[in-house]
Image (cartoon, helix red, strand yellow):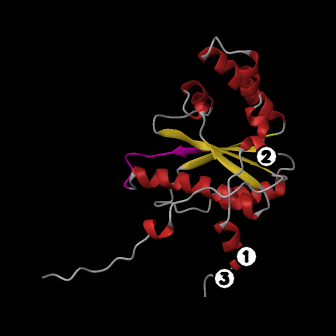
Amino acid sequence: MYPERPLPDALERISSRRSVKAIDLAEPGPNATILETILETALRVPDHGKLGPWRLVIFSGDDRAAFGDILAARWQVLHPEANEAQIKFEKNRFLRAPVVVAVLSERQPAHKIPEWEQILSAGAVCQNLLVAANLAGFAAQWLTEWYTYDAHIQSLFEIGDHEDIAGFIYIGSAASKPDERPRPETPTRIRHWRAQKEA
């Protein structure tokens, strides 16, 4: 039989998962071995046509600060009136978490697999990153801030005409779990199909 057995502990963990704000993340982050497992798990997503319509870019160590310098410089170009506090904030964006993962959506619009399904596959990678990080004992947040949509920043990732940044996943540790937030009432979002009898 597949799967071999249920994993009630995993279901309980996932059902109570909460994103932790990037600003509240801290060391330790996943080591190289655990991070590799998280990344491999993230790519186990539905992928119609076996296209692999996504790629990941990892930021850790000093590379986070180096990318922060780029963000700060770009922010100054876009906002010449920016003060030192704002520039410093941009400079430290990627230092908010020990690891940041950029998820890039790479689509083939002319392919027989609908482009929408390719986009959904990249979104599934983002969600898998959040779940895998949580199951590995880490907190995470999926963010799409201004730099996700900035043409210059996108060019640094060699974004093509049919590509986008699906988001940045910040991974680290949290001192406590955030309070639960309001969510849609389950019965309002779920119904069972009932065949309609023809008159």
For marks 2 and 1, the one nearer the N-term is 1
Q: In this figure, which residue is indicated by the disc labeled 2?
A: 25
Q: Quadrant of residue 37?
A: bottom right
Q: Nearer the viewer, residue 101 or 184?
A: 184
Q: Position of residue 185 (x, y in %)?
A: 50, 65
Above-or-below relation of 116 to 83: below
- CB-based contact (under 8 Å), mark 3 and mark 2: no
Instruction: Report the amino acid beneath label 3.
Output: Pro
Q: Position of residue 188 (x, y in %)?
A: 44, 66
Above-or-below relation of 193 to 179: below
Q: In this figure, which residue is indicated by the disc labeled 3?
A: 6
Tell me what residue is drawn at x 79 percent, y 36 percent.
Answer: 95
Q: How many neighbours does mark 1 have within 10 angstroms: few (below 14), some (14-19), or many (20 or more)?
A: few
Q: Quadrant of the N terminus?
A: bottom right
Q: CA distance from mark 3 to mark 2?
A: 31 Å
**Hey, which residue is sitting farthest bottom in the picture?**
1
Badge 2 marks a residue whose secondary structure is loop
